[in-house]
Each structure stands twice: as structure tokens, then as C-alpha cells.
Amino acid sequence: MECLNTLKRGTPLRSPTTTPVLPPEIWKHIFQFVGPDDLLSVVLTCPEWDELLDGTKTTMLLPQVIPSLMEYIDRNTILKLRMITNSTKRAVDETLQSFYDSDDEGPSNINFEETSSQQHLRKVADGISNRYSFFYPEFGYFLAQLFSSLPVLSSEVNPFLIRHITYVNYICDFSSRNICCMHRSLLRFCHHLLSLKCTVMGDPRILSYDRIVDQWGLVPNLKRLAITYEGMITSQTLNPDLPQGLVVCNFPTLSQLVRLTIEFRIENVGLSKFVVSLVRHYSPQLTSFTCHATLLALPDFTVDMLNTKFLNIKKFHLVVEAPEHRHVVTALEKLSNVSWSLESLRIQVHFGDDINAQLILSTINNFRSSLAYLELDCNKVPDEPNVNESNIYEEELYGHMSNLKTLVTLSSNMKLDFFKEFLQKNCQNLKQIHFKTVNVLFTQRGRWALEHIRSLEKVVFWNGGVGPLDRRSKYTMHRVRDNGLNG
Amino acid sequence: MALVRVISSDGAAFLVSQRLAKRSGKLKTEIETFRKSSDNSEAQPEIRIVTIRAEILRLVLQWLQQHQNDPVLPANQNEQDGRGDAEMGQSQWDRDFLAPMDLGIVMELILAANHLEVKGLLDITCKLVESKITGRTVDEIRTAFKLKSDFKGNEEEQTRLENRWCVEN
């Protein structure tokens, strides 16, 4: 009676907490109806069920361990895993794709935190993505074969292991049959692609720009577009001081596009017009933009235009490839006056040593409150006397950057007083510094940085600044407790 | 000695030293999070690992204990440092440790080592499974892992074509 009284209305009724006992055969029968994802939970529930399902455990686990496993096996074996079952195939493809895409998540194309085994996987992913290129004469034939082997209406099947393709506007080596098949295949499968590298070839005066942009319309889900130019430099010299104006091009709507990379110097009449029009068209939707100093220096890009067009820009990467001091100065002057809230800034100088420190500092300073990642890949940033001479400049140019967490630069910059001052005054929230070069003074420099920047957790020196990352060694210095240093 | 209670998915609790637990990246983070959120600095942290069952958790902790005096292998260890994967290789103890396990247990250990961020254990278990795959034919792999082909129609042929295009020569 008492028991009944204590059971109030609305109290949920629970089964006894002990496991209900059913004969193993019945459990086995029940498990046949459980989906593969839940089946693993069954295995994890109790040892008896694990034993009961022993026959199917490896079957269920293989697709799940594939992402870890792929870092330890070679490319051809990875491909072989795609042949086992649909779920292993899916596991391989998803791992490769997310790995390839993660390249773009980071602010830099180098992910400094990668382990050596992840670097291996990156090499595999890059190697496979390189195969999806119209530079291979047989690529059209491959697409045609694929096209004929797939039944009609199977366009939801994605034939690209990595959703990236390199397209060449000007193909002369294909037989007409292949071109035809290629276009049919592209029409059917290109909605699977997220990333496109468009290589423009030919004489820029007579190029059909409309035909180039028409191809982009076949790739409606494009997120990342890179454009290179491989062709002649015309005798018609471009006057970089004059606005290039616009060409009328029917740019397709690419609603997913967020990243644009212009991989060449602006030195061609015609092509420059096209690029200016292209950048103007897509700039409002971009979060990430890479270009050469020659492009940003064009009078078409006024500070006003940069402010009103690039509404969502978060990452900017400026490349300097040739001795073009004048363009660099113009480009940096514009950058130091735009009202963007950049989170990531990379300035990469492949040539020349004539960028003045003051200009660099005022550019960085312009993004002082928002910048989280800064890469100064400049060979030499000379210590301009006027930085130290004038106190007014000093006050204006140095200031705390509260969000800056990662700095990547060359260790030779540590020779410069202004750079040390910059580290001390601006970088007091910095977590890590990566030096792309190692020299004999590196421990001394690392120690200096750890002593002068209280927030700093580690300093990493990358050996052999020019080689591919996977063949480089690195040396890391960590802060141990409060003041101790450890190599 | 500061201790931590690590609880498996099926409710078994393991009491281990925090020093040992912190050799797992995941447990280290969990202990630190607990420290920050707890007012009492003497309180013993309790961490529930919902994806790992007792038998596997015990093996991971056993491996950690055996290797507790090894140099810490950070997740971003580079092979060229000289202390890289190759040299860390398998000790006789590791070989004896893995020997009685069937493939299913080793695969569960991979998932556990990955989840708990134990690089050294991930290395030896992955290499063991790798040896069952590299150099074998597709059918041999299917037999080893008790898998059946579920490709329909020309899916297999399509995969073969895709692979042939991507293969490294």
C-alpha cells in the first residue's frame, strides 16, 4: 500500500536498471535492423554484445579508422581502399576533400601545426588534385570514358576525388571528339566542383574573354577561383598610371564564391582591363583576395573603390614578384588607408629589398585592432632612418594589437631595431612567432622574443626557407613555466 | 600525488595520476578545463569518455603507463627532428602489447588514441593495420576485414576508372 501511495501521478515509470536478459540469438536478430553507425554503439555498450558482433566489428570500424590510417599509407594504397566498399570509398574521398579544403581555412597556405604524417596526406591530396587538369592531353579522354561508363541521369555521382580542377582556356592538342565529350562531361559533373584554377593562354589582345567566363558558369557552386596567365607579353606596353577601364563581360553569378586569387603581374593591355572588371564584379562577396602589387597599384583601384567594393574582405595577400618599387609603394599606401577590418594579412616579397619600414608599419597599423595573423615575408625590411628620427611617427606607428596571435616572418628582420620595437610595442598578445629561416643566431633571437613578449608561447624556426615544407626541419622553443626556456 | 578519475562509456572508473593522464592531449585539456571551472583547487577531476569502453580505455592507460617516461611526442613532431616517428618505432614491449589483440581491438585502439590524442599509440596501431593493407589485393583486404563488396551496377568500374586516372606512376 505504501508503495502505491508514494507513486505520484505523472512520475515517469522506469524499467529496472538491470539489463533485461534476452537470449543472445535474439539480440543478434535485433542487431540486424540497427544501422551501421548505431551498431558501433552496440559494440561499445557491453562486452557480451561486442562478442556477439565480433564478425561485423572490423566491417563497421574500417571506414571510421580510414581518416587516421590514411596518414600512414601511400597514395596507391589509399586509392585501393576506394575499391573495397562504398563506405570505404566515401571515407577516403571525404578525408581527401576536407583535407584539401582545410588548406583554405588557414590564413596561410602553410599550416604550421601539421605533423609529418599530415604533410604526407597533403602531398597525396595535392598530387591527386593535380591530375584533374586540362594540361594533361588525356584528361578529356578520361572524362569521356567516365561519361560513357556512367548511366544516364547519374549526374549526382561525383567523379572528382578532390573537388578542384585546372582549366585551360586554349586547348589545341585535343581532337575535336575529345573536346566535345569533355564539354558534355563538364556540363554534367561540374556542379560538384568547389575550386577552379583557370589558366589563361594566348595573345591577350585577341583573347575571347567572354568564352573564358562562360566556362565559370558551368561551375555554379564554385567557392575558390584562381586565375593565372601563361602567355606572351605584348609589345603594346601598358601604362600603369592610367585607369584601365572596363570590358563588357557577362560574368556568371557565382553565389558561393568567397576566394579570388589573381596569380600574375599586370603588364598586358587587354588582360588588365579584364582583371579590373572581374575584380570589381566579384569583390563584394569575397572574404579572401590575393593579388600582385601591380594590380592594386592601378588607378582603377582608389581607396574609395576598395572601401565600397570589398565589403566582406577578411584575408588579404599581397605578392611582389619583380623590382617594382613604385607599384609597391602605391599599393601599400592604399592599403594603409582603406577601412577594411582584416583578420589576416600577408605581404610576400619575392624580389627586391626596397620596401620601407615606415610604409609597412603604417599598413599594419591600419589593421591594428582586427588583425589576428600577420605574415611579413620580406627579405629585408631596411631600417629607415626617418622612423627613428621622428617621435611623431613613432607614436602613430606603434600601438598595441590586441588580436594578433601569430606572426610569420624571416629571422633576418630581428637585426632591425624598428622590428624589435614593433614586437615589443605592438605584439604583446602574440602567441607564436614562426621564422621562415634559421641562422646561427637563432637561439639568441628566440630567447630575446620570449623574454620581451610575455604572452609568447613558442618560437619556431623553419630550416631551409626555400624548400618544400615537408623536407624542412624545424626547431621549436617553448616557454617553460614563467621564465624558463626550453629548446 | 594529484589524481584524476577517468570513466569509460560503460561506467568503469580508472584512478590515475594527473601526470600520466596529461600525456593524452585530450585528457590534459579536460583537466585544465576542470581546474578553471572548479573553485576548489584540491577537487579531484572526473572525466567521462563516452566513446571509449572500459577494455579499450584500460589498454590505452596501460600503454601510457609503460611509456610515461618517454620524451613527450608533441602532435606536431616533425620526422627530421631526429626523434620522429621512425625512431620512436616499436619497442619489444609494444610488440608484446599488440600481439594478443585481434584486428577489431586494434582498430578500436586507433579510434581511442585519435580521440584521446595519444600520438605514439596512434602510430603503432595505425602501422599495424597499415601492414594488413599495403601490398595486398582488394580481395585480400576484404577477407582480412570481413567486408563484402556492395558496389552496384557500374559503380565498381567507375571507381576503377577514377583510380586509374589518379594513380601515382
Image: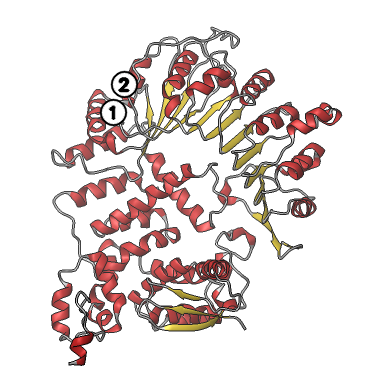
Instruction: Give the quadrant of the C terminus of chain A.
Output: bottom right
For residue A285, side relative to residue A28 (left or right):
right
Task: Report the Cα–Cα distance between label 1 and label 2.
Answer: 7 Å
The furthest residue to the bottom:
A1
From this view, report whether residue A204 is shown above or below residue A292. Answer: above
Instruction: Give the quadrant of the N terminus of chain A.
Output: bottom left
Q: Amino acid at mark 1?
A: Leu
Residue at 44% of width from left, 83% of height from top?
A: B13
Asked whether A400 or A354 is in front, the reply is A400
Asked whether A46 or B99 is in front, the reply is A46
Which percent across, then down, holds residue B90? 52, 75
From this view, report whether residue A175 is shown above or below residue A468. Answer: above
Residue at 42% of width from left, 22% of height from top?
A: A200
Query: Same chain for the residues at labels 1 and 2, yes or no?
Result: yes
Residue at 15% of width from left, 69% of height from top?
A: A33
Label 1 residue SS = loop
The furthest residue to the right:
A389
Provide the chain ID for the residue under circle 2: A
Which of the 4 image quadrants contains residue B104? bottom left
- Residue A239's tag is none
Sort mark 2 into few (<14), some (14-19) or many (20+) by Cα contacts within 10 Å: some
Label 2 residue SS = helix
Which of the 4 image quadrants contains residue A257? top left
Q: Amino acid at mark 2?
A: Asp
User: Mark 1 = which residue?
Assistant: A218
Q: Contact (CB < 8 A) between labels 1 and 2? A: yes
For residue A158, side relative to residue A386 (left or right):
left
Asked whether B157 or A261 is in front, the reply is A261
Which percent across, then down, holds residue A76? 37, 54
User: Mark 2 = which residue?
Assistant: A214
